[in-house]
Amino acid sequence: MTGPFDTKSAYGGAFADPTLDARLKLLWIGVGTAEPDLFRQSIPPAVEALRRSGVRLTFFESQGTAHEWQTWRRDLEDLAPRLFR
């Protein structure tokens, strides 16, 4: 990704749709805090940009893990119960 996350143009403008939040049941984003720089430096600012634009989302950080089994395991433990609320 180059530059800051633009909620108006990212993913074909999907996040700019004013009806998105009403139609969205769950937007969940997870990342390990030991991920490579690309993730660590781009995901949290994108999450904040989405929140500032009014998109409700859940952001989960797996402390001390990278793109590995432990991250996925913690992500699933946080995400699975939310799917059935």
Image (cartoon, rainbow, N blue to C red):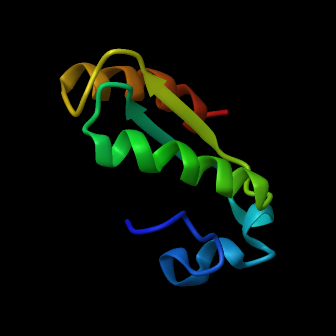
Q: Quadrant of residue 71?
A: top left
Q: Find residue 51 and report its horizontal and vertical position in percent.
A: 73, 51
Q: Find residue 27 and report its horizontal and vertical position in percent.
A: 59, 50
Residue 25 in view: no
Residue in the foreground of this view, choosing between 54 and 5: 5
Q: Find residue 11 and report its horizontal and vertical position in percent.
A: 49, 76
Residue in the foreground of this view, choosing between 35 and 18: 35
Name the quadrant of the N terminus.
bottom left
Residue at position x 80%, y 76% from top?
A: 18
Q: Is residue 71 left or right of residue 31?
A: left
Residue at position x 57%, y 36% from top?
A: 59
Residue at position x 28%, y 20% from top?
A: 65
Name the quadrant of the C terminus.
top right
Q: Is residue 49 left or right of residue 34?
A: right
Q: Quadrant of residue 81?
A: top right
Work out which residue is located at the far top of the displayed protein and give it: 64
The vertical placement of 29 against 68, above or below, is: below
